[in-house]
Amino acid sequence: MKKPVPIAAVLVVVSCSFSILGMTAGPGAAQERATPGTATVQSGGGPLGADVFRIKEVDLGDQSWGQNLLRVSVENLSGEPQPFWLHVGGRYQNTGRPRGFGMGMEEVVVLEAHEERIVEHPYWIPPQVGELSYGVKFVLPTGSTPPWEQEPFLRETYTVTYETPNRRCNELTPLPQSLKYDWLEEYRDGARIRPFEVVSTEHFVFYVLPDSPAAKEIEAIRGRRERVMEEVCAFLEVSVDARINFFLFPDAASKRWCMGHQGDGLAFDATIAEIYSEDTRLDPAHELTHIAASLVGSPPALLNEGLAAYMQAGHEWNGEHVDRTAAELLSEGRLVSLAELLTRTEIGSRPDDGKVAYPQSASFVKFVIDTYGREQFLKLYGALRNGAEDNAARFEEVLGVELGTAEQEWREALEAV
Ligand SMILES: [Zn+2]
């Protein structure tokens, strides 16, 4: 539920509310590096760089989900130090998203005159089922044009299909010693992450690590998740046809290592990942609600996160009923105005979101459901669009009441809590 952090050279944006983006070359970073690393030799014919570097071998590693290691055997044929820009990126093609589901990592490497070596470049494959098409590109940076707009002197493309259940993830690649991340130390030797155990049920394919708390309790977990799935689908009047790939990690490090995401839980497309340890147990309905509710609509975070938190057992957030928390926030003057909350495209990135925006949104969702009925709420959920400017107008159109009036009624109801 938190903002992501970059892993290695990877810029990965993942959020609780099923968006995941592999960012390719960010203009800032790459350009900054392209200037000092500008090539000094101009090419004759063909793409720039073809006569400067000889790429002898491109080894992708085992192409498993999670972290992978690209190894490129390369030689600088020139008599001067030369940089090349290396990019690994691609997309899942069949995700139901217009542009697929992407990933991308880039780096500038400098080779000394006549140097020949193996360049190691970590890359990350999002754990997703389907066909991933991706490529490795090599560009001689000129400094005048961003490398991602230049013609590569070598481009290799690949297609890998990940089935359900996927056992490719079992071969987890150790990362190069040169990478330094505190959280990674425990997983420096990739072999220490043992192969996933895979348990398939009607709606889920569970991936758990051997001897982890989730592996020990998988029978109870699968039964409970199936029940909650049915409750959530019945409430939302949808049926989720795709099997959900459900990862349960024993700690934050293993989850981050495989999913490229920090935070306790996330959901995107048909994938859920949660930490399941002695200390951390997420409410079983929250992420499932995100997946099922995506079939109803894509409203602003007020309704999206509000509903997911509302669906938690007993309408509780952090162990307290959401109305009780909202009533306390009201008395302390800490509620965010709904007009403002309605413009937020996500909840979770602000330091106080866990204390304010989540429980407040859940309390307001509960108010709408209790006051106007579930059917009307679902209509509202389908009518509002995340990021749209006319959401307040749409709210009034669906419920027949101004947002400000509804907010006032909700606040009055909270005063009686
Ligand atoms: Zn959420």
Image: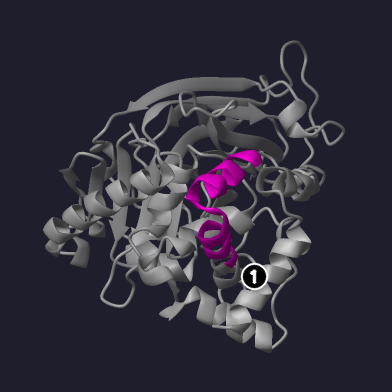
Give whichever of 56, 128 is nearer the camera: 128
Q: For this view, does 367 lie left or right of residue 33?
A: left
How far across and down, in percent of the image, does residue 99 sit?
Answer: 59, 27
Q: Main secondary structure of the magenta part?
A: helix
Count the marks: 1
Above or below 51: residue 331: below
Q: For this view, does 64 lie left or right of residue 335?
A: left
Residue that mark 1 sits on: 410
Is 41 colored magenta in this rendering?
no
How far across and down, in percent of the image, does residue 241 sit?
Answer: 33, 31
Give whichever of 142, 17 is nearer the camera: 17
User: Residue 256 appears in which quarter of the rendering?
Assistant: bottom left
The residue sitting at 16% across, 46% down in the picture is: 199
Is 365 colored magenta in this rendering?
yes
The image's colour scheme reads one colour
Q: Residue furthest top?
A: 45
The residue sitting at 58% across, 21% down in the picture is: 155
How far across and down, in percent of the image, does residue 334 sit?
Answer: 70, 81
Which quarter shows the C terminus? Answer: bottom right
Q: Can residue 258 be seen?
A: no
Q: For this view, does 82 lie left or right of residue 188?
A: right
The residue sitting at 72% across, 72% down in the picture is: 336
For the residue carrying disc 1, how many other residues have a C-alpha within 10 Å: few (<14), some (14-19), or many (20+)? Answer: some
Residue type marked 1? Trp
The span picked out in magenta is 364-383
Q: Can residue 316 be seen?
A: yes
Above or below 23: residue 154: above
How far across and down, in percent of the image, does residue 216 sit?
Answer: 13, 64
Q: For this view, does 145 lie left or right of residue 322?
A: right
Task: Indicate the secondary structure of the residue bearing disc 1.
Answer: helix
Above or below 130: residue 171: below
User: Residue 383 appears in which quarter of the rendering?
Assistant: top right
